[in-house]
Image: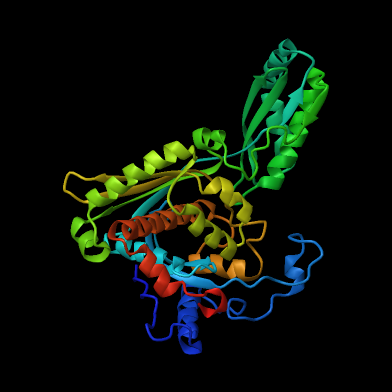
Amino acid sequence: MESLPSIPRSREDDFTPELVAERRRLAERAAGRELPLLGGRPVAFEEARGNVENLVGFVQVPVGLAGPLLVDTTAGQREVYVPLATTEGAMVASYSRGMAWMRAAGGATARVVHEGLSQHPVLVFDSVLEAIAAAEVALGLADELVALVAGITSHGALVEVDPRPLGRRLVLRLRFTTGDAIGINMAARGADLCSALVAERTGARARYVHGQDVEKRAHAHGQQQGRGRAVTAEVVIPRGLLAQKARCSPEDLVAILETYRVGYAELGTQNQLVQSANGLVALFLACGQDPAYVTESCNGQLDFAVTPSGDLHASVWMPSMLVGTVGGGSGQGTAAECLEVLGCRGSGHGNTFAELAAATVLAGDLSLMAAFCSHEFVAAHESLGRNRPGGA
């Protein structure tokens, strides 16, 4: 595989039309076609049909390229430029820095290890005993519920029925596979049909399709059981590379993460990554994902360890990555162009996109933690993030 060239930059003026055009040509080469919408051509209004109501236009968010990012994925080794939409100065540079270290170390490895979009409709009964009995009925209806969902979709499937009594209520946890789509609408429709059938067979007094509402919020179920795509990424960074490029050691990074974990425990947070929301929301905006799902997707664990040879092993675990490369906003406008830059537009790329997203998060967390260790964080923001009110 021919390596991608480094992204051109200028210390004097990084925003000249010539330099922006040069970087866009790199993106076009990666996508295999021209990218006129990223270049500023207006998006046709009809491309937003089904994604928004009362359309007035399109929000413009700057898109920068990070990378190249080198990752061994389930689809093989991929080297890509990562489009990130953001207004936070220094962020794209930070992610590019981490990606450069990972590339110099031979690349990261990322894998989706579990798939399943859960929905949690709730049925209400008059007594605890009725809810317990209804759970047994629901389990006995599993084959019928699977067939019911098969009748509404050719891309997804109901793969688990897990009824759980909660007092006089029954949480009907349903897990779906969704192919390369995020699959929220399909799963919601399937959950509505399934809960209606169980309610009819059990005499429930009420039912709510989102009775235990897991959508777009951090929750313990997502951490423990996963939701969407559970994905992990890892890399080994040589000690010498860290000393030269990051001006810190593996032991420095292990020590700062230990301190962060103490702070996380006191906070009670379910997000024990460092800046995962930064990279994910920028990637989601660029690639037509629903940014509200960052609330679930950004949660997970960062791990640093010193290897027996004295190098740094770094990894992230993200159990609830909610992304898709078909459906939603992924096929329209600049989102389609950005997915093509990643080589992830359309069917067959859902898991690869999730794996590239996890590797991106790993790169950003590596870079930021190293900047904290070397006390370069504030200086980087002063140098690159200087868009202050009034020009201060």
Residue at point 76%, 61% (across, down)? 52
Identify the residue at image location x=36%, y=75%.
6
User: Is residue 375 shown above or below 185?
Assistant: below
Position of 243 compared to 171: left or right? Answer: left
Residue in view at x 32 percent, y 42 percent: 258
Give the percent coordinates (x, y) of residue 17: 51, 88
On screen, residue 342 above or below 133: below
In the displayed image of the protein, which residue is found farthest to the left?
Answer: 309
Q: Where residue 341 sits in the image (x, y, percent)?
A: 50, 69
Percent across and percent down for residue 7 are: 39, 76
Residue 211 in sight here: yes
Q: Is residue 30 above or below residue 285?
A: below
Frontmost residue, 343 versus 56: 56
Vertical side of 54 occupied by 373: above or below:
above
The scheme the figure's colours follow is rainbow
Q: Which quadrant does the N terminus fall into?
A: bottom left
Q: How many marks?
A: 0
Between 345 and 199, the one lying in front of the other is 199
In-front residue for pair 9/118: 9
Indicate the quadrant where residue 77 lies: bottom left
Q: Is residue 154 visible?
A: no
Q: Tell me if 18 is positioned left or right of 163 in this view.
A: left
Residue 143 % position (x, y): 67, 26
At a point 69% along the width and 75% down the height, the residue shown is: 43
